[in-house]
Each structure stands twice: as structure tokens, then as C-alpha cells.
Image (cartoon, helix red, strand yellow):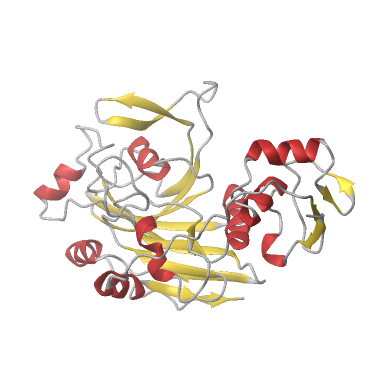
Amino acid sequence: MSASIRPVTDDEADIRLDRWFRRHFPALPQSAIQKLCRTGQIRVDGKRAEAATRLAPGQAVRVPPLPDAPRAERPAAPTADPHAFKELEERILFKDEHIIVLNKAPGLPVQGGPGITRHLDGLLDLLRFGNEHRPRLVHRLDRDTSGVLLLARTPGTAAKLAALFRGRDIEKTYWAIVAGRPLPPEGRIDAALKRIEGGRGERTALSDPNDPDAARAITDFRTLDHAGQKFAWLELRPLTGRTHQLRVHCVAMRTPILGDEKYEQPDQNGAFGARFAGLSDSLHLHARRLSFPHPAGGRLDVEADLPPHMQATFRTLGFTAPPPRRPHRH
């Protein structure tokens, strides 16, 4: 077998060289890819390249003769569940050849874990719509958080979007109903966080910013309405993406999100106060809006309607939420 030259496609922009090889030759182990790079047998545009080299569309990758190995077969898609497919299809807010945007239901885990048998990642084969690639998650929402969730329809798009989420090009807007009323009514929370083990399992906690295990976390907040001093409707804009950032930052303001039994403090009238007021004890946190650069150019804004339990709470408290605007690319 002789060496061959393969072009890097537009969909493979910014992918690492080793991942490019694993995509095209899934039976080739990482150790073999690294050795082929070290010995100069793998080249990019005729030059030696390291395994971590990022590729650009149009570049030529030299593929040397590879050891014989059975080509990995693509796993067969699971038998379609008509009910599950209909439920997911009804939650699609936007779809094109690059992405799918869903309004995730509260209570549905995004990925599996201990004791979790049904999760969104396990259902994504149902959303191929004839595409050879399975949709991929590019960010996460907590199990009990509802709202806008973005999926990539190709590996290249997933890499581009994941890079955007690591930067500051994604604008995320959440709505929350909290116990109490923050003072001042708007501002910025700049409070470091870290993961700890506690009585309620692994949790996120406020931390000294000089702690080597801490990560800076920033949230902009604004009060959109309030019901006396007991409850408030907040707009939350996280500028960083730490685990449970919004939930812990709301507790730091002494206004815990309704239904957040994991983080509320006994003296803060959180989920228990919601029950006392006759409100749902489900988590009242919703990913309302996502604005991001579309992979094909321009910027896409997508909004999601509130889940039923938050709609009921809005009615009870007299809050009026505008309907979500149609997806807009500009």
C-alpha cells in the first residue's frame, strides 16, 4: 500500500491532526498516530506536523501506509421510538444542515450518570434526519434547568461551537424566579467558585479567589419584576461557564432560586418558602435565550418559552413574560 494525500474539508476546520486521523481511521491507536508524526510519515502540506496541530480547510494531509486493521463499523441506529421522536421533534426551535436547537424539558438529564437510564444524549440518534452523523452536544444544562440547548449536526461544527463556548462569543440569557428581592436590583456578581464534597454530594461553593482550586465566575443580573419583597424575576447573564454558577451566585445574593434544594440555605426562605406560598417546588431556572455566531456566517438568536411550572408561577405572582421571538439570523 502506498501513501495517499487527503484534503481537509471545510467541516474539519480547526480539528487536531490526531483527531482527524481517528475520525478517518478509527482503528488506528493514538500511540501509532504519535509515532507516525514523530517519524515524519504523517505530513501536512508536505511538512512535518505534531499530533496536536490544528488543521485548516484545503490543507493536504499525507496518509502513510497504515497497518492492517478491521475498519470500525458504524453502530446501527436504535429502533426509532415514535413517542420519543415526536416529543423531541416538538421541542425543536431551529434546524438547518449545521445545527439543531432544542427547548430542553426540565427533569431530562443531558447525559447519563449513576442511576440515570434515560437522558438526552441517548436519544440523539432519533434526530439524525437522514444525516450520516449523530448530533453532538456542545454545551450542557442541568437536569432540572429548562430552555435553549444547542446541538451540532457534524463533527466539524461541533468543534467550532465548542471553541466558541470556551470563549466569550456566546451570549447566554437565563430567567429565574428567586426567593427575596436582590438589592441593588441589578449589577454584577464576581465571586470565585470551586467544587467540594459535602453532605449533599459534590457541590459548587464560593471560594477565596486566591485558592488554587478556585475558578473566577462572573454573572450579570437584572430584576425584571418582583412581588413585594418575597419573590423576584431575574434576568441572569453568565459571563463564565462554571458548574451551577447561577445557582450559587443567587444564594450568594441571599435570593436562592425557587426549588433549589441543593443550594438554598435554611434561613433564606428558598424552596420551602415556595411550597408555603403554593408554588411549584421544581427548579425555577430557564435558559431563555442563546445568541451565537452561526457556523455558516452571521449570528443566530434563539429564544425558548417557559416550562409549564414556571408559567404557572408567573401567573400566580402576576409576572407577564413576553412570548419568545422567532429564531433570527443576522
Residue 232 vs residue 171: left or right?
Answer: left
The residue lying at 68 percent from left, 60 percent from top is: 12
The residue lying at 63 percent from left, 46 percent from top is: 28
For this rendering, which residue is in front, 183 or 104? 104
Q: Is residue 173 above or below residue 47?
A: below
For this rendering, which residue is in front, 114 or 259? 114
The C terminus - image quarter: bottom right
Labels in figure, total:
0
The residue lying at 65 percent from left, 56 percent from top is: 24
Q: Is residue 137 above or below residue 302?
A: above
For this rendering, which residue is in front, 242 or 237? 242
Q: Position of residue 174 (x, y in %)?
A: 41, 56
Q: Is residue 322 visible?
A: no
Q: Position of residue 289 (x, y in %)?
A: 45, 64
Q: Position of residue 236 (x, y in %)?
A: 43, 52
Please tell me in which quadrant of the rendered image residue 2 appears.
bottom right
The N terminus - image quarter: bottom right
Q: Position of residue 6 (x, y in %)?
A: 78, 61
For this rendering, which residue is in front, 56 or 161? 56
Q: Is residue 97 above or below residue 236?
A: below
The residue lying at 79 percent from left, 50 percent from top is: 64
Please tell me in which quadrant of the rendered image residue 285 appears.
bottom left
Residue 115 vs residue 111: left or right?
Answer: left
Report the residue that reaches farthest toward the top.
Answer: 211
Q: Is residue 287 visible?
A: yes
